[in-house]
Amino acid sequence: MDPSINTPKRQPAPEPHVHGPDCDHDHDHHHHVAQEPYRRDKPKLGRNDPCHCGSGKKFKKCHSY
């Protein structure tokens, strides 16, 4: 039996919807709120900085996992 006889024909993919100011369906275009960037209290500890535990080793050789 030829498998191409019983296979359904594929429908073409629908056009992708592009949201914009002329979009006519119901949703809010202004729902994105800018977030404040994360600010550290102290500068980030670098891999070559002395470890925070006081061992005298570099961070990368002591507490860096």
Image: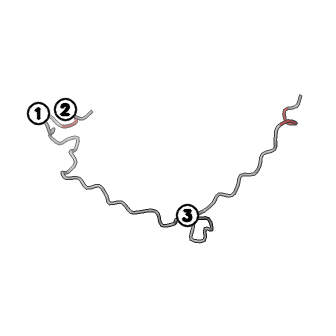
Apparent side of residue 54 relative to residue 26 in the rendered image (left or right): left
The residue type indicated by label 1 comes to Ser
Apparent side of residue 1 relative to residue 39 in the rendered image (left or right): right
> In this figure, which residue is indicated by the disc labeled 1?
55
Mark 2 in CB contact with mark 3 (< 8 angstroms): no
| Category of crowding for the residue at label 2, using alpha-carbon neighbours closer than 10 angstroms: few (below 14), some (14–19), many (at least 20) | some
Residue located at (56% from left, 71% from top): 21
Apparent side of residue 18 relative to residue 55 in the rendered image (left or right): right
Secondary element at image label 2: helix
Q: Nearer the viewer, mark 1 or mark 3?
A: 3
Q: Residue 34, percent across and down?
A: 38, 63
Residue located at (22% from left, 48% from top): 44
Q: Nearer the viewer, mark 2 or mark 3?
A: 3
Say whether disc 1 or disc 2 marks the residue closer to the N-terminus: 1
Secondary element at image label 1: loop
> In this figure, which residue is indicated by the disc labeled 3?
27
Say whether disc 1 or disc 3 marks the residue closer to the N-terminus: 3
Q: Name the image quarter holding residue 50.
A: top left
The residue type indicated by label 2 comes to Cys
| Category of crowding for the residue at label 3, using alpha-carbon neighbours closer than 10 angstroms: few (below 14), some (14–19), many (at least 20) | few
Residue located at (18% from left, 51% from top): 42
> In this figure, which residue is indicated by the disc labeled 2?
62
Near-viewer residue (19 or 65): 19
Residue located at (21% from left, 34% from top): 63
| Category of crowding for the residue at label 1, using alpha-carbon neighbours closer than 10 angstroms: few (below 14), some (14–19), many (at least 20) | few
Q: Name the image quarter holding residue 8.
A: top right
Secondary element at image label 3: loop
What whole-number distance in Å separates the C-alpha atoms at marks 2 and 3? Answer: 52 Å
The residue type indicated by label 3 comes to His
Near-viewer residue (61 or 5): 5
Say whether disc 2 or disc 3 marks the residue closer to the N-terminus: 3
What whole-number distance in Å separates the C-alpha atoms at marks 1 and 3? Answer: 57 Å
